[in-house]
């Protein structure tokens, strides 16, 4: 069934998390790319570990796929031992970067303030930030989803000159914490309702471009639920962890979404 809805690009962003060496990335791409070459209805992006950026960028050279990092430091290059600056991921081939993934918020204690500074840096360096937001199960049960997401988005843009932001300069990924890596995806009703909340807020915050911002859903997207979730009118793509790690599985998701465009 074709999707009767906006003609925005549909994005499939693979989030490899802390997986794959350069050699594994090579083998993965060797298997995946020939099988998705014909799928022109979706934009496939790869969010890979820092050490895999440069080799993956070589493999993807001249191809229509985008490459990005999963994190970066909020400071300009300088004396921050062990850290990676925006300029460095860009130099290694990144055009986008995940900001505020819930695993960064939870395990590495990233605060809304830090995430805001990273957003500032991403815009400064013209990397496309994919801002990840989402509530925990406790917050959902306490009916705090809307206020949590609103505060995450408002603080991410704190003191940023909204008028200077262009249409495709960023995306928002709704990733309910309870759905990430659990095999328990949010229902289509929850995804649609929460994306509506995000969309309304973006329209309020940035009237000129708010309606055009692409919204991704992430959290246990799989071959089983991709079809149903990708036909929701305000879902413009997926951020996929576990199901992006095997080229066969990821290719099948690409085909499913492509067919439904
Ligand atoms: P998952 O991860 O698909 O394994 O739930 C999604 C994410 O964390 O981006």
Image: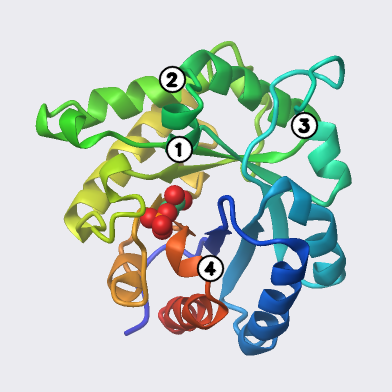
Task: Name the mark on residue 103.
Answer: 1
Name the secondary structure under disc 2.
helix
**C-alpha separation, residue under disc 4 versus residue under disc 1:** 17 Å
Q: In terms of sequence position, does the residue under pointer 3 or pointer 2 come before the other? A: 3
> Would you name the residue on which mark 4 appears?
245
Above or below, 252 relative to 101:
below
Q: Secondary structure at mark 3?
A: loop
Q: Do the CB atoms of the residues marked 4 and 1 lie less than 8 Å apart?
A: no
- Badge 2 is on which residue? 154
Callout 1: few (<14), some (14-19), or many (20+) C-alpha neighbours within 10 Å?
A: few
Q: Is residue 105 left or right of residue 144?
A: right
| Marks 3 and 2, how far apart at CA | 26 Å
| Residue 23 in which image quadrant | bottom right
Residue for point 77% across, 50% down = 51
Q: Quadrant of residue 232?
A: bottom left
Could one spot residue 235 in this view of the protein? Answer: no
Ligand 1 sits in quadrant: bottom left
**Figure quadrant of the N terminus:** bottom left
């Amino acid at each position: 069934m074709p999707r009767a809805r906006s003609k925005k690009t549909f994005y499939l962003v693979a989030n490899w998390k802390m997986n794959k060496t350069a050699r594994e990335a090579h083998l993965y791409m060797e298997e995946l790319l020939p099988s998705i070459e014909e799928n022109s209805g979706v934009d496939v992006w790869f969010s890979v570990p820092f050490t895999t950026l440069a080799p993956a960028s070589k493999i993807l050279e001249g191809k229509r796929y985008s490459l990005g990092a999963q994190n970066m430091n909020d400071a300009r290059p300088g004396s921050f031992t062990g850290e990676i600056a925006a300029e460095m991921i860009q130099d290694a081939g990144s055009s986008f970067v995940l900001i505020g993934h819930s695993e960064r918020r939870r395990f590495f204690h990233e605060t809304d303030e830090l995430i805001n500074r990273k957003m500032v840096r991403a815009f400064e360096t013209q990397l496309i930030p994919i801002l990840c937001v989402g509530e925990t199960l406790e917050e959902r049960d306490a009916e705090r989803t809307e206020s949590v997401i609103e505060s995450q988005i408002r603080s991410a843009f704190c003191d940023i000159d909204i008028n200077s932001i262009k249409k495709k300069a960023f995306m928002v990924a709704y990733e309910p914490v309870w759905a990430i890596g659990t095999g328990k995806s949010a229902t289509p009703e929850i995804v649609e309702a929460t994306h509506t909340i995000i969309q309304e807020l973006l329209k309020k915050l940035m009237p000129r471009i708010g309606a055009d911002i692409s919204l991704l859903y992430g959290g246990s997207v799989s071959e089983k639920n991709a079809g149903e979730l990708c036909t929701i009118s305000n879902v413009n793509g997926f951020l996929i962890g576990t199901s992006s790690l095997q080229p066969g599985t990821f290719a099948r998701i690409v085909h499913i979404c492509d067919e439904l465009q």
